[in-house]
Image (cartoon, rainbow, N blue to C red):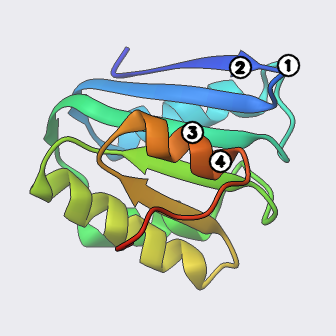
Amino acid sequence: MPITFDINPSDRIVVMRAVGVLDDHAVNLARASIRTHPDFDASMMQLFDMRSAEQITLSADAVRALASVSVFSRESRRAFVVRNDFQFGMARMFSLYSESHAQTVEVFREVEPALVWLAGGALPEGM
């Protein structure tokens, strides 16, 4: 499966990991699985680790469509972690589209600052 996830109810976080090819089918499949998982609560935080994705085949239209409908609530903090500039650009595009739907999504290059921010910390300087 190109996207795996772990739901941690006690920490109120969903950790997702992309591996291989990240496309709209994989994202939609993961969303459907999360939405119906008994431990999922839409108000949880999300950490989406894209660093192991070898290829992203989402079009700008697909990113816009995915950002327009979320399984997470508007109050949820969501952090994407990327490894290269292309992933950063794709995640940032998703973040910008999400803003127009009152979603908070930030993009990071390392897991630790993302976890700090998710836990309520400030954004690192320069972001």
Q: Check disc 4 and report its element: helix, strand or loop.
A: helix
What residue is shown at x 71% (from left), y 48% (from top)? 71
Which label's residue is closer to the chain start, 1 or 4?
1
Please state which of residues 37 and 73 is positioned toward the viewer in this rendering.
73
* Amino acid beneath label 4: Leu
52 w.r.t. 95: above or below? above
Counting from the top left corner in percent of width and height, residue 93 is at: 34, 72
Label 3–label 4 contact, CB within 8 A: yes
Counting from the top left corner in percent of width and height, residue 116 is at: 59, 44
Calculate the distance from the C-alpha at mark 3 to the C-alpha at mark 4. Answer: 5 Å
Which label's residue is closer to the chain start, 2 or 4?
2
Q: Which label is found at residue 118?
A: 4
Calculate the distance from the C-alpha at mark 1 to the C-alpha at mark 2. Answer: 7 Å
What residue is shown at x 21% (from left), y 31% (from top)? 53
The nearer-to-camera label among 1 and 4 is 4
**Left or right: 73 as drawn, with respect to 115:** right
* Residue that mark 2 sits on: 7
* Residue that mark 3 sits on: 115
Q: Check disc 3 and report its element: helix, strand or loop.
A: helix
The nearer-to-camera label among 2 and 4 is 4
* Residue that mark 1 sits on: 39
Which label's residue is closer to the chain start, 1 or 3?
1
Q: Estimate how packed mark 3 is, as few (under 14), some (14 to 19) or many (20 or more) residues with alpha carbons within 10 Å.
A: some
Q: Quadrant of the C terminus?
A: bottom left
Calculate the distance from the C-alpha at mark 2 to the C-alpha at mark 3. Answer: 15 Å
